[in-house]
Amino acid sequence: REIELITISCSKALETLEYLEEFIKPGITTKKLDTLAESYITKIGCIPALKNYEGYPATICASVNDTVVHGIPNNYKLKEGDIISIDLSVSYKGYYSDIAKTYPVGNISNDKKELLRRTEESLYLGIEQVKPGNRIGDISNAIENYAKKHNLGIVRELVGHGVGIKIHEDPNIPNYGEKGTGPLLKPGMIIAIEPMLNLGKEDIYLSDDDWTIKTMDELPSAHFEHTVLVTDIGYKILTKR
Ligand code: MF3
Ligand code: CO
């Protein structure tokens, strides 16, 4: 029953992100995207789960260019060549979902294109490790190896996590680690895997607003996240069609 409700929550989160996608164009403010997200989530019978989470002031995280994650929506107008990561979580009847994706705004540089493609690929390589008998470290290691191979900086301070009756549950899922280590994956577990990779170095800092996390070298960063169910034979991505 819980898996069913979390599955519905995940499809609502996906639906919201797909709705927002249409609006990601030069000229729109991140605040406008936030307002659109909030009314849409409410309209489809859910509650924006990030709002007021530990004091977070908005519905989505909107992280542009060198912002890694937790960018607070504001009056910044997207411009051609930007990348924007949108992270959102909804609650449906008390059951949570978590999804994030980085989008290009119009035409972007080849470096940024590659960063997006590689970060998404690292997420899928992590997800492919999800099956009963494997361990969290197998996911972490797959992401780390791929990021290193392509010289991308791995953000270490933030991790994936269990998802369910809270947005963040055990276990932590780092984006680096050793094969065969960490908690064992079992059917019925639901986890969010979310690599954050930097075009430059891995170093990040927390801005004065106490939320926005940016790269130290000011190079762009990407973030892709899916909520995934461990099945009897492998995995099912709940935040995907
Ligand atoms: N959805 C985010 C995650 O991937 C949570 C952001 S926490 C917030 O775990 F406090 F910034 F909302
Ligand atoms: Co998450």
Image (cartoon, rainbow, N blue to C red):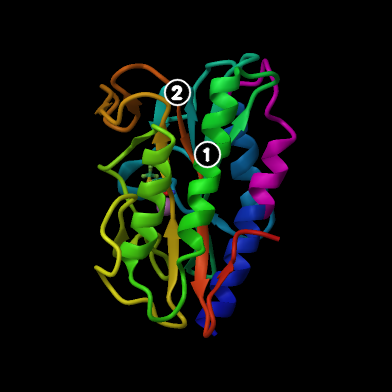
Q: Tell me which amino acid carries mark 2.
A: Pro
Residue drawn at the location 32% of the way across and 51% of the way down: 159
Disc 1 element:
helix
Q: Residue furthest right?
A: 22
Assign a secondary structure to mark 2: loop
The three-letter code of the residue at mark 1 reads: Arg
Other-residue count near label 1 (Cα within 10 Å), few / some / many at <14 / 14–19 / ≥20:
some
Q: Which residue is drawn at the image coordinates 60% and 27% (left, top)?
A: 113
Q: Vertically, is 170 above or below 116?
A: below
List x then y, in percent, for residue 203.
26, 28
Q: Does 167 sit left or right of 209 as displayed?
A: right
- Residue identified by numbered label 2: 220
Q: Is residue 94 left or right of residue 28?
A: left
- For the point 59% across and 78% down, the residue is 4
Q: CA distance from mark 1 to mark 2?
A: 13 Å
In this rendering, does residue 31 appear at all?
Answer: no
* Residue marked by disc 1: 118
Q: Locate residue 111, reporting x and y percent.
A: 54, 22
Left or right relative to 210: residue 164: right
- Closest to the camera, between mark 1 and mark 2, is 1
- For residue 190, above or below residue 222: below
Which residues make up the magenta segment? 15-29
